[in-house]
Amino acid sequence: MIAIGCDHGGYELKQEIIKYLEEQKLEYKDFGCYDTNSVDYPEYAKKVAHAVADGQAEKGILICGTGIGISIAANKVKGIRAALCHDCFSAQATREHNDANIVAMGARVIGPGLAVKIVDIFLNTPFSNDERHIRRIAQIEE
Ligand code: RB5
């Protein structure tokens, strides 16, 4: 299952990403928010981050205006490696090198075409399992 969440700034882009998840027949859970009324992004970051950290979701997707606030908040949850990605190279590299378990994006930064491509790469790129990357990820948790 993929956990997805956003604040008001990310709501419309989240709907585009949900359309992609449905087309791909991927199971997902939408943790809100559910319209464009102003909300506080940490609430949604934490809901998605806890779903991933608890093992309820395999990966998470978070969207706010910039992607910055929501990724900072998600990274406060133990075990979460949320990567802010606005390009395809970063989406691939963060899976291969960091085993990122949440991708964050800013709806005021990129358009839906690129965002969907980033999500597609993020969901379909395996972790490299290279010893050096395993070691570095373990050091993050120390
Ligand atoms: C909301 O206006 C905006 O601050 C939020 O979506 C995000 O960009 C925060 O980092």
Image (spheres, rainbow, N blue to C red):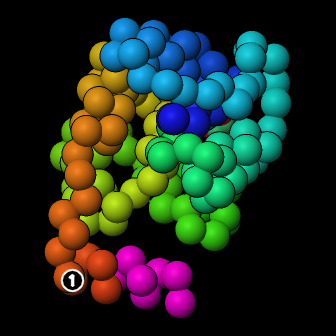
Q: Residue at x 63, y 19 (%)?
A: 11
Q: Is residue 65 visible?
A: no
In depth, the one of 116 and 53 nearer the eye is 53
| Neighbourhood count class around disc 1 (C-alpha, 10 Å): few under 14, some 14–19, many 20 upward | few
Q: Quadrant of ligand 1?
A: top right
Tell me which corner region of the image, top left, top right, bottom left or bottom right, holds residue 5.
Answer: top right
Left or right, 70 with reference to 114: right
Q: Find numbered disc 1 in the image and state the secondary structure of the residue it sits on.
A: helix
Q: Residue at x 47, y 81 (%)?
A: 140
Q: Is residue 76 visible?
A: yes
Main SS of the magenta segment? helix
In depth, the one of 72 and 121 nearer the eye is 121
Label 1 sits on what residue type? Answer: Arg
Q: Residue at x 73, y 44 (%)?
A: 47
Q: State the extent of the magenta-drawn residues as a range.
A: 136-142
Q: Which residue is mark 1?
A: 132
Tell me which corner region of the image, top left, top right, bottom left or bottom right, holds residue 39.
Answer: top right
Q: Residue at x 74, y 25 (%)?
A: 33
Left or right, 53 with reference to 107: right
Residue 85 drawn at (x, y percent): 37, 44
Numbered label tally: 1
